[in-house]
């Protein structure tokens, strides 16, 4: 990607580990990135590719592996090939932070392809990119600087098959602006910029900033319009988010569905039907017309190209359903 070069194991400084053996924590709430209008600049920051997949924490204790979502749900059974590959690594114990993706022939991750692979049980298509470590071989390292944690992680994964399902997520030095331009040219989602000198902290932190090429966010489904061609399929979705607990209308999405996904959405939403409008926002007659309202329980991944002056989505495309996040946690997309 142009002049932007990844940092390699040879260039990283690896601190010595202490002779201390402790089991890894059962789960640590993940560090989450704040959305930025532009990536930060300066030597204090390193930059990583932003993946379009499912965030997973890998807990390894001997040969036992658990894969946990960002809310601590155990999804090990959904990713058997990834779990098996992790169990074969030479860890006594570990707690890794990373993302499971499915890549196309150009190496671009796709949430749509990941959803398809999950539905068809194609775990063999999935790759786990580890980008952080909180515990390695009996030692808790979350308090170390990010650069030191990544150096230890890179060293620990050096024996993994380069073409296998477990890979180290390389970081890049240099200009954040150049990095973002490079990944956008490659058709990727964006980058995550991280302070190289900071420890790992749970929750949304300004130490991690995400910059996007195309907007992709989670929204909650508040209603749907049936397809004009098939009354048992979805034609479009009414979307919203929770702003300080208030369910707020964000617009509609009417593209991105396949015949199969439109029918599956209809089956998923039918049990949630209700008579009242779930949005606190006052909707126009046009916005209400023909919509079947549902309890706001289902989270959808949506790509879009900006928002109107009124805050509604422009050129929205449905990508898939997210099962790793409760609907009440889906807040304003700019936060």
Image: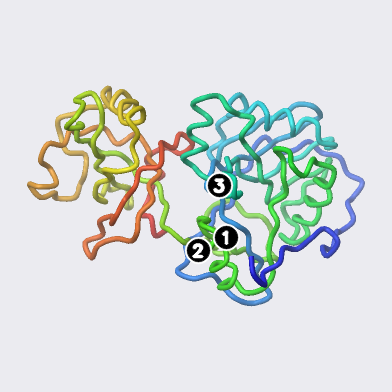
Q: CA distance from mark 2 to mark 3?
A: 16 Å
Element class at badge 3: loop
Q: Position of residue 55 (x, y in %)?
A: 57, 43
Q: 294 above or below 97?
A: above
Q: Residue at x 72, y 49 (%)?
A: 168
What residue did someone put label 3 on? Answer: 109
Picture coordinates of residue 329, whole percent (x, y): 41, 44
Cβ atoms at labels 2 and 1 below 8 Å apart: yes
Name the residue that disc number 1 marks: 192
Q: Earlier in the sequence, mark 2 or mark 3?
A: 3
In the image, residue 276 sits, relative to residue 199, either above or below, namely above
Pointer 2 or 1: first along the chain: 1
Which residue is more in the foreground, 75 or 199? 75
Q: Which residue is mark 2?
A: 211
Q: Quadrant of residue 277?
A: top left
Density class for disc 1 (Cα within 10 Å; few <14, some 14-19, many ≥20) is many
Work out whether mark 1 precedes mark 3 in sequence or the reverse, and give the earlier one.
3
Q: Residue furthest left?
A: 285
């Amino acid at each position: 990607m142009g002049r932007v070069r990844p940092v390699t194991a040879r260039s990283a400084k690896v601190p010595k580990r202490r002779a201390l053996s402790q089991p890894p924590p059962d789960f640590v709430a993940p560090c989450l990135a704040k959305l930025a209008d532009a990536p930060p600049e300066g030597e204090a920051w390193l930059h990583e590719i932003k993946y379009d997949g499912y965030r997973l924490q890998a807990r390894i204790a001997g040969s036992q592996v658990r894969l946990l979502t960002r809310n601590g749900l155990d999804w090990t059974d959904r990713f058997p090939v990834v779990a098996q590959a992790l169990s074969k690594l030479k860890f006594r114990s570990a707690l890794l932070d990373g993302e499971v993706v499915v890549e196309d022939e150009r190496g671009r991750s796709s949430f749509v392809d990941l959803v398809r692979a999950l539905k068809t049980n194609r775990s063999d298509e999935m790759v786990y990119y580890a980008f952080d470590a909180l515990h390695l071989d009996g030692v808790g390292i979350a308090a170390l600087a990010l650069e030191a944690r990544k150096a230890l992680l890179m060293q620990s994964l050096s024996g993994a098959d380069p073409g296998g399902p477990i890979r180290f997520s390389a970081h890049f030095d240099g200009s954040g602006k150049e990095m973002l331009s490079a990944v956008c040219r490659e058709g990727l989602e964006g980058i995550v910029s991280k302070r190289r000198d900071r420890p790992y902290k749970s929750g949304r932190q300004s130490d991690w900033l995400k910059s996007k090429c195309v907007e992709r966010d989670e929204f909650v489904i508040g209603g749907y319009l049936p397809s004009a061609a098939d009354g048992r399929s979805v034609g479009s979705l009414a979307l919203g988010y929770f702003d300080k607990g208030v369910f707020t209308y964000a617009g509609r999405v009417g593209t991105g569905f396949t015949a199969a996904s439109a029918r599956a959405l209809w089956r998923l939403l039918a049990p949630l039907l209700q008579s009242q409008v779930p949005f606190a926002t006052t909707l126009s007659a046009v916005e209400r017309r023909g919509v079947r309202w549902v309890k706001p329980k289902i989270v959808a991944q949506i790509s879009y190209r900006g928002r109107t002056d009124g805050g509604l989505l422009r050129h929205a495309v449905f990508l898939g359903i997210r099962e790793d996040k409760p609907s009440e946690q889906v807040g304003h997309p700019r936060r």
